[in-house]
Image: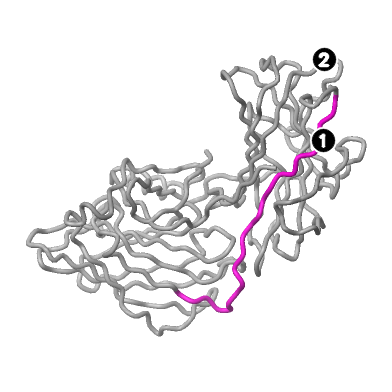
Amino acid sequence: MSARIAHRLFRPAATAVVAAAVAGTVLLPMSAQAATSDDARRPLVMTMGTPAPNGPLTRGGAAETFELTVSNPTAKTQAFHPWMLGDAAGASPLQNDDVTFKVEAVDAPATKSFVGHQDGGWQGMFYPSGKDLSAGFDVPANGRLTWKVTIGLGAGYPTNDGDFKLTATSLNGEVAQNHQASHTFKADPQIKAGRLKTWFEKKPADMGGPTARQYLDLHYQATGDGAFASALTTRLQLSYAGPRVKTPAFFVQALIDGRWQDLKVDYDSVVLPAIPKGFGSDSGVRTLPLRINLGVKTQIKKVTPITAEADVSLASGNTYPFGGATAQFSLGPIDEGTAPTTKPSTKPTGTPSTKPAASAAGSAAPVAAAGNADLTTTSATGSLAHTGADSRTGLYAGAAAALVALGGAVAWLGARRRRGTSAM
């Protein structure tokens, strides 16, 4: 399933999302609570001690340790469900193993920990040993609990990600926004943080009229230092105005190895050829020409507005979409005599071409969204991305069930990976 939810920290009318590491699993807590009007009902206060040895983090190197304390200033025992949220400055979402995490009880019950990802970022939680994730801790009246937390960068921490910000809060909203704690860990070596830009360029239509077939160039460009350590996959979603029909019959092709090749359409969505790992700013602008029309058997019987939306994600692991683009155009049914005669293949092969064939795509429109006239295209495979559960599926499925039981969670500050979309 495609999650389209931005990161937020504990704000009015926000919604929290906890994504388990099982592919396709997204947990949607029932409600988020206001940050200012009911702080009195969120009395717990979190503090983070100074990390030691208080130096920069290196990939696969030494970690930093600090004390994490939650205080209860009230005369009543309060429940506490710890939630550590990590966010990297840079283009790549974080995988579970990109950050190392260890929690030891100092003045608290024996503790176990769990790591996963939340949207494009990383998350760590801990809970009482011998209980499930939903149990939480009891902070005594006018008392406190303390843990020793150790954070490091995994050997595979993306080279296009830099400093790592860790925010300590509570999954069930027991900590008010102004009582949370955070620390930004410097990453060594320092990098120039960038992002992935993705945009559509509309091309002239052909095949019997302006609404018979639409040509789109889908462009990708990475900025900043480093490169993606994972292949990137793109899912193209096609939607249409008007009543839903049983068979929209979209027909989609991509220009690969200099020829138009059929892509498999599942009702209204298409997985596009993957971008191999190693894509970065040195790769230049990568372009995948597409052409879209309605098949002969379509139940869309008149010229209809169409929206094409591309969602880009890592090909495996944390597959939350972190980039994308949209385009709007119109399509109408075509005559049987002008319809493509080949059936869509299940797995396209080859590499996207640098330019559409002149006879098929017509003249190119100026590229405005990129801010860069260099349209050099790097090579890419046409293979479809593989996703699926790994050996930890059972663990995360159990954690997912526990998280559902937690009920309303805290939504939290600041967009981490807002999708950059543009229509051309």
* Magenta-colored segment: predominant secondary structure: strand
> Could you say whether the residue bearing mark 1 is in a helix, strand or loop?
strand
**For residue 354: magenta?**
no
Horizontally, residue 182 falls left or right of residue 239, namely left
Q: Name the residue nearer the viewer: 255 or 364.
A: 364
* Pointer 2 local density, CA inside 10 Å: few below 14, some 14–19, many at least 20: few
Residues shaded magenta: 185-207
> Which quarter of the figure is the C terminus placed in?
top right
Residue 209 appearing in the image = yes
Q: Amino acid at mark 2?
A: Glu
- Residue 219 location, x and y as percent? 73, 49
What residue is drawn where x is 82% and y is 35%?
204
Horizontally, residue 226 falls left or right of residue 288, namely left
What residue is drawn where x is 68% and y is 48%?
199
Residue 147 appearing in the image = no
Q: Which residue is mark 1?
A: 204
Q: Amino acid at mark 1?
A: Pro
> In the rendered picture of this protein, how many numbered marks are placed on residues?
2
Horizontally, residue 178 falls left or right of residue 371, namely left
Q: Which residue is mark 2?
A: 336
What residue is drawn where x is 73% and y is 45%?
218
Q: Earlier in the sequence, mark 2 or mark 1?
A: 1
- Where is 153 relative to 91, above or below? below
- Where is 27 relative to 410, above or below? above
